[in-house]
Image (cartoon, rainbow, N blue to C red):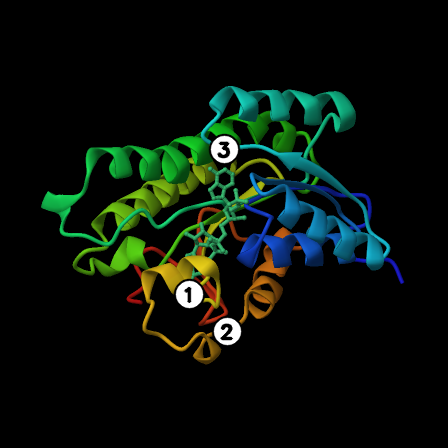
Amino acid sequence: MAGALEGRVALVTGASRGIGYHLALRLASEGAHVIAVARTVGGLEELDDAIKAQGGAATLVPLDLLDMDGIDRLGGAIDERWGKLDILIANAGMLGVLSPIGHIQAKVYDKTMRLNVDSTWRVIRATDLLLRRSDAGRAVVMSSGAAHSAKAYWGLYAASKAACEAFVKSWANETRSLPLRVNSVNPGATRTAMRALAMPGEDPQTLPSPAEVAEKILPLTFAGLAETGRLFDVRQNRFLTYRDPE
Ligand code: NDP
């Protein structure tokens, strides 16, 4: 049976593990050709094996997303090979450090902002035109509940995710008249390496698996999606408007 994404081309950043890995796997199982980006070649190869085992296809792109020129080159390569992009999952991110704002080291601040904000913007910039060329372009930018919760010690990560959401809201307003739909996602606490780093004392088995979370995000890539410029909350399994209490 043909999948919902047959013939679609999907770019997934942070595809070597966690939520990105499982989302890439599901996109491929629905028929999309997945372009999988991360630094860890072993993780990408594992994904490739799993995609092939289910009869799908992927292109692996080992890339450090701190390399902004590399992101631009990737956009150029997608243009050359496919001339369009149907799905963008801007998922790669890092926690940085949980720390009082006054104690954050400048080096840690710079790296976290450079990955979570600068590289996300750069990926958006490199793919915007390609997504506009699709008859059903869909972009998902991974945010976090932290962007809204104002928790002590989470300021760096929270600011980086709030910046991503701001980009998405403006991008949606720039593209509202097109078939393109762009949304932020709050996956909620998920059983991944990043969550373990943030909450070392927590029992991971109490959390949803990245496969379960990916399943809830998948419909945001489908052609039937109407929403744009909104925040999808995985735990509540619904879109929030930015004025909704959370
Ligand atoms: P993981 O730490 O499990 O995975 C992060 C992914 O990002 C990896 O594939 C990693 O690949 C990639 N990545 C990190 N740094 C770089 C880099 N410099 N260049 C290229 N790729 C990079 O994270 P999660 O799956 O938990 O998180 C995915 C997204 O969801 C993130 O944006 C996160 O902020 C967000 N999120 C997660 C929550 C959770 O509870 N897990 C809750 C709320 C939001 P590699 O190291 O191979 O490069």
Query: Which residue position holds label 3?
Result: 65
Determine the CA span between mark 3 and mark 1. Answer: 23 Å
Q: Nearer the viewer, residue 205 or 246?
A: 205
> SS at mark 2?
loop
Q: Mark 2 or mark 1, which has the lower sequence index?
A: 1
Q: Is residue 78 left or right of residue 54?
A: left
Q: Position of residue 61 (x, y in %)?
A: 65, 35
Q: Is mark 3 within 8 Å of ligand 1?
A: yes
Q: Is mark 2 within 8 Å of ligand 1?
A: no
Give the crowd class for mark 3: few <14, some 14-19, many >=20 residues within 10 Å: many
Query: Which residue position holds label 1?
Result: 188
Query: Which residue position holds label 2?
Result: 208
Q: Residue at x 60, y 66 (%)?
A: 211
Q: Nearer the viewer, residue 22 or 215?
A: 22
> SS at mark 3?
loop
Determine the CA span between mark 3 and mark 2. Answer: 27 Å
Residue extending farthest right = 1
Q: Quadrant of residue 233?
A: bottom left
Q: Is mark 1 within 8 Å of ligand 1?
A: yes
